Every structure is written in C-alpha cells, then in structure tokens.
Amino acid sequence: MSLKEDINNKKLPKHIAIIMDGNGRWAKQKGMIRAFGHENGTKAVRRTVETCAELGVKNLTLYAFSTENWNRPKLEVQTLMKLLISSLKKEIKTLQDNNIKLTAIGSLKTLPEKVYKELQDVINLTKDNERMTLTLALSYGSREEILNTVKEISFKVKNNLISPENIDESIINEHLYTQNLPDVDLLIRTSGEQRISNFLLWQIAYAELYFTNVLWPDFTKEHLYEAIIEYQKRERRFGKTSEQLS
C-alpha cells in the first residue's frame, strides 16, 4: 500500500523547496564518476516534479546550482551545464503534458549563453501553464539575493521612489527573486546533511525542515510522501501558542 493514501489533500504545502544533495556520493558508492550521479539525479527530478503536480502542490523550487558551485572542478561544472541543456530540452514535453510553468531564480546572466538561451526558451514556452510552478534555482545564493535587494531598495530610497518609513516585509518580498512565489512551507534536504547552504534564507523563515539520509538519485515518490506526511503531523504556530490555534 502506498503512503499516498495517508496524505491529507486539504493540508498540502503550497510551496515545497528541495536541496537535491548526494549525486556525487551516490556515484562514488557505485564506483562511478560524479557525472553519473548527476545524470541519475535528473530522473529523481522528473519523479518529484510529476508527483508534486499529481498531488496538487502549487509551487516546487529545486536548488539546482548554487553560486558556490562555480568553484567545483571545471570539468564537473561543464558537465552540469551540458546536462542542464539536455534536461531542459528533454523535459519540455513533460512540462507541457503536466501543465507546469517553469521559472528560474538566481544570477541567470552568469550562466553560459547556450544554457541561458535554452532556459529562456522553455520559460517562454511554458509561461501560460497553470497547474504548478516549477522554479529552478540556478547560480543562486540567498545572501547575494538579499544583498541585491538591499541595493535596489537603497537606490529607490535615494531617488525618492520609496520612503524609508514605508519599507516593510512586502517591499522586501517585491524585490527578491521569488517575488511571485509564496513563502516556503516545507524544505527538504536529501543525503543526510542538515544545513541550509545559503538557500532561500528569507523565504524559509517559518518553513518546516525535513532532512532525509536518502541520496538524491534514490529519492522516490514514497520518500516525498513521507516528507509531506511528516509535514502534516507538525503544528505550525507562527509564534502563537497551541491554545490560540485551537
């Protein structure tokens, strides 16, 4: 029997974010090069995207490539970029068949020209899809995002476009890469690591954190169901007491 039957469809997280970790270790365990792990990681991406869409999750954000990942060996970075291009081309049909809109956040202009063009093509092709929004965090770092937000707001204050007294959370949200997304409800990290790694620091302020030892290429539908069921068991108080919620 699938764990899917234990999920309460009325209490689904509106926004799931995933730190997809463990591709390299998965490949090493099998005596293969890291690229083999990244290739198999794309299968887990497809499973997860399709499962979220089937369940009715409205927003899924995947940490695909961080600003720090540029410091990895040059060959691995090149492999990841080639894999990204091929994956985007392959997944157009999946996105269209499932009515999924693709978006991307991060310093996208730092991506290789071919990757940036392919990404924009898929974003444009899927922009009218409404079932779910899939966001790829590419060349993304949360501190850089917050730094850029501070600079943009400071510029507008300097030019009298925003009054300092009017700066609140909504103003900050409007200047983040994720301005069109709700806050994260559930953050999942695979591979047993228990840290945030500079991912959506502002947006996960009240997210439920779920860590699993499963390496990303092995992450299945059932593992996602487990994470959602655990999320639904937790009491989300947002600073209030249990008595106030009841």
Image: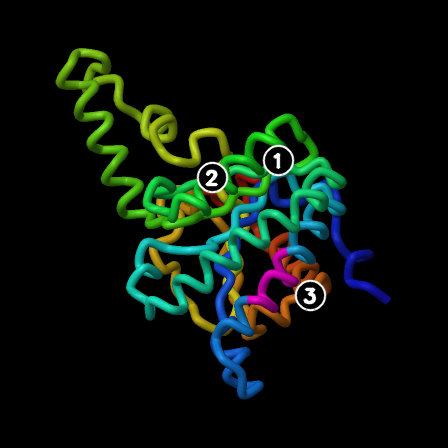
- Magenta-highlighted stretch: main secondary structure? helix
Image location (x, y in percent) of residue 3: 77, 62
Closer to us: 234 or 139: 139
* Marked residue nearer the N-terminal end (3 or 2): 2
Do the residues under discs 3 and 2 have CB atoms within 8 angstroms? no
The residue most toward the top is 160
* 3 vs 2, front mark: 2
| Magenta segment includes 42 | yes
| Magenta segment includes 222 | no
Q: CA distance from mark 3 to mark 2?
A: 31 Å
Image location (x, y in percent) of residue 107: 34, 42
Do the residues under discs 1 and 2 have CB atoms within 8 angstroms? no
Image location (x, y in percent) of residue 186: 54, 51
Query: Mark 3: which amino acid?
Result: Thr
The residue wearing badge 1 is: 101
Residue 11 appears in the picture as rendered: no
Q: What residue is shown at x 36% (from left), y 60% (from top)?
A: 197
**Crowding at mark 3 (Cα within 10 Å: few <14, some 14-19, many 20+):** some
Do the residues under discs 1 and 3 have CB atoms within 8 angstroms? no
Q: Is residue 117 above or below residue 222?
A: above
Q: What residue is shown at x 20% (from left), y 31% (from top)?
A: 151
Query: Mark 1: which amino acid?
Result: Lys
The residue most toward the right is 1
Asked where in the image residue 163 lies, by quadrant, the reply is: top left
* 1 vs 3, front mark: 1
The residue wearing badge 3 is: 220
**Crowding at mark 1 (Cα within 10 Å: few <14, some 14-19, many 20+):** many
Q: CA distance from mark 1 to mark 3?
A: 22 Å
